[in-house]
Amino acid sequence: MTTSTPKVLQTLNIVSILMFIISLGLIFFYAPREVVMGEAQRIFYYHVPSAWVSFLAFGVAVVGGIAFLRTGNHKWDRLGLASVEVGIMFALMTLFSGMLWARPSWNTWWTWDPRLTTYAILLLIYFAYLMLRQGIEDPDKRARFGSVYGIVGFISVPITYFSIYLWRTIHPALFGTNSSETKMTMEPAMLQTFIFCNIFGAVLYTTFLWHRFRLENDTAHVEELRMKASNA
Amino acid sequence: MKSYLQAILAIAHKDLAAEIRSRELVSAMLVFSLLVVLIFNFALDLDKSARENVAAGVLWVTFTFAGTLGLNRTFAAEKDRGSLDGLLLAPVDRTAIYFGKLISTMTFMLLVEIVVLPVFTILYGISLFNLPLFGVILLGTFGYGGVGTLLACMAAQTRTRDVMLPILLFPVTVPVMLSAVRASTGILLNAEWSDILTWINILVVYDVIFVAVAVMVFDYLIEE
């Protein structure tokens, strides 16, 4: 079962590290200083990629969940779990980088803006997902429940976003979140950095997911061997 | 179709009959709700105008907390008595179990709400007796019960079941809470109907989507 790391994954490791170094170089030395927001704006090059990658990760978990429920192949469930864990990591990155940006820009660490609120709830849903899995011993049941909760949780996210959006826009907005972002004009150097960082985010996700998935496969294999040993 | 409906009603009837005999659950939910209403009054130290603004919020928090108590018992009781296996052996579609449980849970919640509403009216000095508000309460309870029944079935089968349910349920039901509270506040403060309708629309959309999803996935939660 345990095979040596595939060539493609080894390459991905190196590419990820290289892209990380290059992205730091681009962000701090190539991209110009933003006029309105100043240095804090550079956070955005990591913030935005982590945000959409986290959604991608949770989306992959839904696909894994549906595929598991249809086929009963545990590989899909392990992929779902791996993707949720990697997704949580990216989501925390998004949250903390956002807070670091919000402090100088909005003069507060946190505001109950629809996007922020929905995102916090999203994180809580996936913490609940992990706790749910921890509370179930039977591997088959764990996989089924995890898949179902992954699907139900992800479906609730757009409705939550929409309802909070409506709730907040009826009130006067204290902070012009939408306007400040749409008004931010991107110079070519900024745009290039931004695109590079987005690709880096996708590559990093793939690398992490693959490693986590392999680890989960090995764990399942060890568990299987232990069961066999205790039965013999 | 007829036998399917009969199966649903039989399961709901079974739960209701058990409850009428023991009166454990509804009385506990009721006392708990009244306590929550009282505690909110102390905790928020409300004057007249503040009471009007937060009334709907307090009301819905009370309903959801009481609902969690009820939901925790629906499947846990079956599991403790070992009667869940009996239910699963019954030659009916599994989703009949879901709807039966949904009906009994909703009945318990509605019973509590019927008692809480007049008490709330007296204690908070705000009349809650109007028809649109009843409609919102019905829709909100349906949505909350719909998702709650699904997740309660899950939580009952985990190690830390009583603790698990609110953690699973609350983040997913944020839209129900929010739209129900907003719609209720709108009704109580005589807001524009177009504003209130927006929230009722969200409530209906949520109810439809989540009950449909619950029906699709419920089978996977109880197969042995």
Image (cartoon, coloured by chain):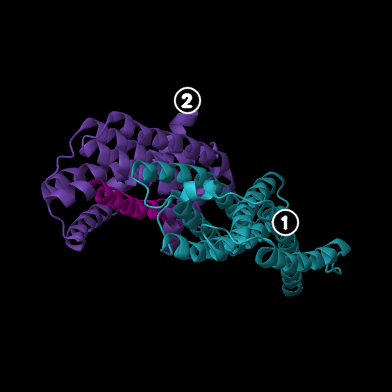
Chain colours: A cyan, B purple
**Which residue type does callout 2 highlight?**
Lys
Residue B207 is left or right of residue A92, and the answer is left
Residue B107, given in percent of the width and then of the height, sits at 32, 41
The chain letter for the residue carrying disc 2 is B
Q: Is residue A124 above or below residue A24?
A: above
Which residue was labeled with disc 2?
B2
Q: Main secondary structure of the magenta part?
A: helix
B126 on left or right of B99: left
Front-most of A13 and A147?
A13
Among the 4 quarters of the image, the one containing residue A50: bottom right
Say which residue appears at 59% left-offset and 65% top-offset.
A137
The location of residue A5, given as percent across then percent down, is 84, 68
Q: Which residues are magenta?
A: B55-80
Magenta span contains residue B59:
yes
User: Is residue A22 among what the camera can see?
Assistant: yes
Note whether B17 is above or below B169 in the view shown.
Answer: above
Q: How many C-alpha atoms fall within 10 Å of the one at disc 1: few (<14), some, or many (≥20)?
A: some
Q: Is residue A94 left or right of residue A16?
A: left
Q: Chain of mark 1?
A: A
Amino acid type, label 1: Phe
Decide if residue B64 is on the left or right side of residue A134: left
To which residue does mark 1 refer? A196
